[in-house]
């Protein structure tokens, strides 16, 4: 089954996708919706932008491998609202949520740096 949902798409896109979606196909009618099953996926991270500055007041903070998660400091979702952190970003229990992740620890080496835009925690520089 093709993935192009409308005939208003450019002809090259429709051809690339194998034709328009057949909304009468068993793949859609049987479960009642369209879905995709992905068996395997590989994600390759790019290097950080050259402008990202890490605070060197702590000798361990130069180790970029410690900074493992990008977070937003706003619900706007703008590029300037993204920062890089060592904070735990996973859920700590089956009852945890994104607002209350229940993943607190006594780690004193949690740090945050700014990718662009704003200053967050002490010792880190804004890129502006």
Image (cartoon, helix red, strand yellow):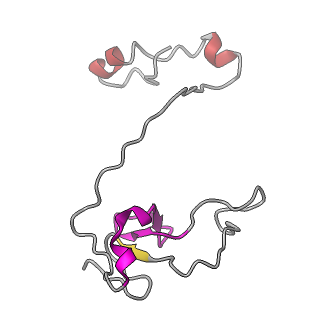
Residue 105 spot, x, y in % from top left: 65, 74
Q: Is residue 108 above or below residue 85?
A: below
**71 part of magenta stretch:** yes
Q: Is residue 63 above or below residue 108?
A: above
The residue sitting at the right extreme is 95
Q: Is residue 96 left or right of residue 43?
A: right
Q: Is residue 77 above or below residue 109?
A: above
Q: Residue at x 57, y 63 (%)?
A: 89
Question: Which region of the structure is painted magenta?
Answer: 58-87
Residues 10 and 113: in front is: 113
Query: Quadrant location of residue 94?
Result: bottom right
The residue sitting at the front extreme is 59
The residue sitting at the bottom extreme is 122
Q: Is residue 67 left or right of residue 53?
A: right
Q: Residue at x 33, y 73 (%)?
A: 62
Q: Quadrant of the C terminus?
A: bottom left
């Amino acid at each position: 089954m093709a993935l192009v949902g409308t005939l208003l798409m450019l002809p090259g896109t429709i051809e690339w996708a194998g034709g328009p979606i057949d909304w009468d196909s068993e793949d859609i009618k049987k479960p009642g919706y369209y879905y995709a099953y992905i068996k395997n996926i590989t994600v390759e991270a790019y290097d950080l932008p050259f402008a990202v500055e890490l605070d060197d007041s702590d000798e361990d903070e130069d180790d970029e491998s410690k900074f493992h998660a990008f977070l937003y400091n706003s619900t706007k979702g703008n590029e300037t609202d993204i920062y890089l952190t060592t904070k735990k970003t996973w859920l700590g229990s089956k009852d945890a949520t994104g607002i209350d992740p229940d993943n607190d620890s006594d780690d004193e080496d949690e740090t945050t740096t700014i990718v662009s835009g704003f200053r967050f925690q002490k010792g880190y520089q804004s890129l502006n």
